[in-house]
Amino acid sequence: MLKTLVDTILLINRKERLGLIVLQLIMIVTSFSEVLGIASMGQFMTVVSDPSLINNDPFFNTLYIFSRSNNEIDFMIFLGIIVTSVLFLSAVIFTLSLRYIHHYAQKIGANLSSDLFDYYMQSNWIFHTKRNSSELISNINSECARVTSAVIVPFLVINA
């Protein structure tokens, strides 16, 4: 599988390799957003389990003053809204990155199909006499789709 993956990466053009770098940057942003969401949930649970941290911890005290809450319950509701917003934003970023992964993989698959079609069209007449046209069409449609769904997409998802 690794050899197939390396061969596939070697087949893509420069623009698609640049897209792979962009994809890596998107995955880094996605990872940080997920870690931030998990960390915010932990901090929220800490404050809910021990409300005295609002006055004792400098970070929560500053946030309490910033929120202009009247009491600890109002502050916990404010903090809960912030945590929910962070988790929602993290989920949106993850969904968009997953969409980009699948879009990018399908674009690579489409370009592989196009390149294979061009190769077949530029082949000489003898090449076409030795092969059935349905076999060539099957290679373009089926095999490129299989490479996309069985090699490229899983690699990008595992990488994510």
Image (cartoon, rainbow, N blue to C red):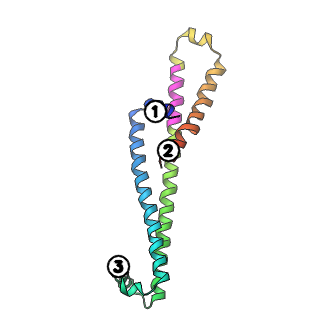
Identity of the residue drawn at 49% across and 77% down:
45
Q: Mark 2 points at which residue?
A: 156
Which label belongs to residue 59? 3
Given residues 52 and 97, the one toward you in this image is 52
Image vertical order of residue 82 relative to residue 132, above or below: below
Residue 44 percent coordinates (x, y): 47, 76
Q: Which amino acid does label 3 sit on?
A: Phe
Residue 2 percent coordinates (x, y): 49, 34
Give, as a single range, the part of the protein colored magenta: 108-119
Element at badge 2? helix
Q: What residue type is labelled 2?
A: Leu
Q: Name the residue under label 1.
A: 6
Given residues 60 and 137, the one toward you in this image is 60
Q: Where on the picture, by quarter, is residue 33? A: bottom left
**Majority secondary structure of the magenta segment?**
helix
Element at badge 3? helix
Element at badge 1? helix
Tally the numbered discs. Answer: 3
For the residues marked 1 and 2, what is the alpha-carbon distance in whole angstroms?
Answer: 13 Å
Among the two numbered marks 1 and 2 on one chain, the one whose residue lies closer to the N terminus: 1
Among the two numbered marks 3 and 1 on one chain, the one whose residue lies closer to the N terminus: 1
Given residues 122 and 79, the one toward you in this image is 79
For the residues marked 3 and 1, what is the alpha-carbon distance in whole angstroms?
Answer: 48 Å
Given residues 61 and 127, the one toward you in this image is 61
Residue 4 percent coordinates (x, y): 51, 31
